[in-house]
Image (spheres, rainbow, N blue to C red):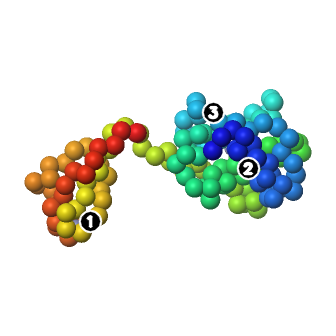
């Protein structure tokens, strides 16, 4: 998703869920680490985490966009726009915004093992000894399929 597509998505969700236009900027900010998005009261713009948007389907990312738009619209209306505020909780629930950003997919090296008998895949952060460990489902032999570096 590009910045332009993100902007269009935020504007569309704003109209559909809040019946109010989003008149500011929504951009991706690669420096966001654990949060899905951020609302800046100073300039009314929104930032979103590009890694989360790359990793999750729109059903999840739309919830993140709604969450930030709840901050945005409440602030514009001089209502309680912070997480602890009653207005915030009520509007978040009404539009179906997400309460927490989903965890980021793990980064670093991952080992993908496949069971040679049932075909199930297993993802591990460490190498395992395939002579000692068998498939947890069928006790079949495991084989290292590939190593992924995220
Ligand atoms: Zn928030
Ligand atoms: Zn198996």
Q: Which residue is mark 2?
A: 9
Q: Earlier in the sequence, mark 1 or mark 2?
A: 2
Q: Residue at x 52, y 48 (%)?
A: 55
| Residue 57 is at least partly visible in this image | yes
Element marked by disc 2? helix
Residue hosting label 3: 29
Does the Cβ of the disc 1 residue fall within 8 Å of ligand 2?
A: yes
Circle 1 Cα neighbour tier, 10 Å, few/some/many (<14 / 14–19 / ≥20)? few
User: Foreground residue, 103 or 48?
Assistant: 48
Q: Residue 72: x, y in percent?
A: 80, 43
Quadrant placement of the N terminus: top right
Q: Is residue 43 above or below residue 123?
A: above
| Displayed quadrant of residue 149 | top left
Q: Which residue lies at the image location 19% right of the left edge and 63% below the top edge?
A: 116
Residue 133 relative to residue 46: left or right: left
**Which mark is nearer the camera, 3 or 1?**
1
Q: Which residue is mark 1?
A: 119
Query: Cβ of disc 2 within 8 Å of ligand 1?
Result: no
Instruction: From the top left corner, tell me how far across and down residue 63 is, in percent.
Output: 66, 54
């Amino acid at each position: 998703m590009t910045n332009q597509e993100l902007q269009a998505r935020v504007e569309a969700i704003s109209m559909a869920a809040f019946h109010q236009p989003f008149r500011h900027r929504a951009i991706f900010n690669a420096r966001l680490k654990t949060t899905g998005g951020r609302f800046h009261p100073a300039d009314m713009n929104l930032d979103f985490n590009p890694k989360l948007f790359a990793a999750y389907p729109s059903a999840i990312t739309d919830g993140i966009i709604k969450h930030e738009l709840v901050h945005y619209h409440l602030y514009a209306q001089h209502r309680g726009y912070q997480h602890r505020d009653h207005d915030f909780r009520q509007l978040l629930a009404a539009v179906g915004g997400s309460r927490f950003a989903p965890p980021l997919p793990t980064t670093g090296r991952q080992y993908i093992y496949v069971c040679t008998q049932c075909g199930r895949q297993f993802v591990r952060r460490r190498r395992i000894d395939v002579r000692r460990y068998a498939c947890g489902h069928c006790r079949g032999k495991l084989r290292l399929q590939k190593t992924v570096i995220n």
